[in-house]
Structure formats: C-alpha cells, structure tokens
Amino acid sequence: MDKTIIVAIISSGALSTLVSALFNVWQARKKRNDGVRAGMKMLLYDRIKHLGKSYIERGSISTDELEDLVEMHSIYHEDLDGNGFLDAIMASVKALPIK
C-alpha cells in the first residue's frame, strides 16, 4: 500500500476522534449551562413573586424597590425567556403608590 494512503487513513481517524471529543466537550458545557440557566430562571421567578406579593400586601413600594423589581422582571422575561406568569403581579406592583 502507498504510504500516502496509509497516512491519509490514519489522519482521517485521528481527525474524526478529535472532532468527536470536541463535540462531546461542547455538549457537556451546553448541558451544564442549560442547568445553570434553568436554576437562575427559577430563583429569579421565586424572588420576583415573593417581593411583588410583599409589596402588594404592604400597599406601597419605593422607587428603588420598583426599579430593582422591574429590572429583575426584564431579565427574567427577556433574557431567560420567562413566561407571562409574573405579568399580573408586575402590573399590580406598578399600580402601587410610590413612597
């Protein structure tokens, strides 16, 4: 057999192994990132819901509290693809008197 063919066969196998290994590393990172993202989404959902309900129960909100809650909701809704479950709470919070 020609040496060029042997080198080509060996190189092809090595390249295939390298690509497979890189793909596996990428998948593992994606899975870990997806888990972190889901965890952050759940924590942010819980925090927004808890704070929103506490402000509604109190009957007022400060400008700093409103600013923080609106920012958290924006990140939850836009960056983490949150659903609309918190929209009703946010509407009630935004209607509160600012003190």
Image (cartoon, rainbow, N blue to C red):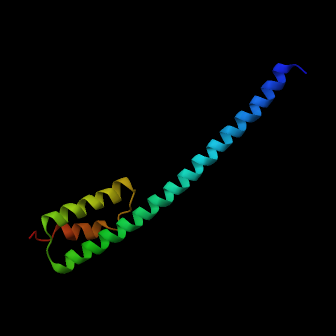
Q: Residue furthest left?
A: 99
Which percent across, then down, holds residue 14? 73, 35
Q: Residue at x 40, y 63 (%)?
A: 41
Which percent across, then down, holds residue 73? 29, 61
Q: Residue at x 80, y 25 (%)?
A: 7
Residue 86 figure quarter: bottom left
- Say which of 95 and 11 sits in front: 11
Pick the quarter of the image with the N terminus: top right
Q: Is residue 28 above or below residue 62?
A: above
Q: Residue furthest bottom?
A: 57
Q: Residue furthest right?
A: 1
Q: Would residue 39 be found to the left or right of residue 21 on screen?
A: left
Which percent across, then down, holds residue 54? 23, 77
- Say which of 87 and 68 sits in front: 68
Q: Would residue 20 be found to the left or right of residue 91 on screen?
A: right
- Say which of 61 and 86 sits in front: 61
Q: Is residue 82 above or below residue 57?
A: above
Pick the quarter of the image with the C terminus: bottom left
Residue 92 figure quarter: bottom left
Q: Would residue 50 be found to the left or right of residue 92 on screen?
A: right
Number of marks in picture: 0
Q: Would residue 83 be found to the left or right of residue 30 on screen?
A: left
Which percent across, then down, holds residue 28? 58, 52
Residue 18 figure quarter: top right
Q: Residue at x 15, y 78 (%)?
A: 59
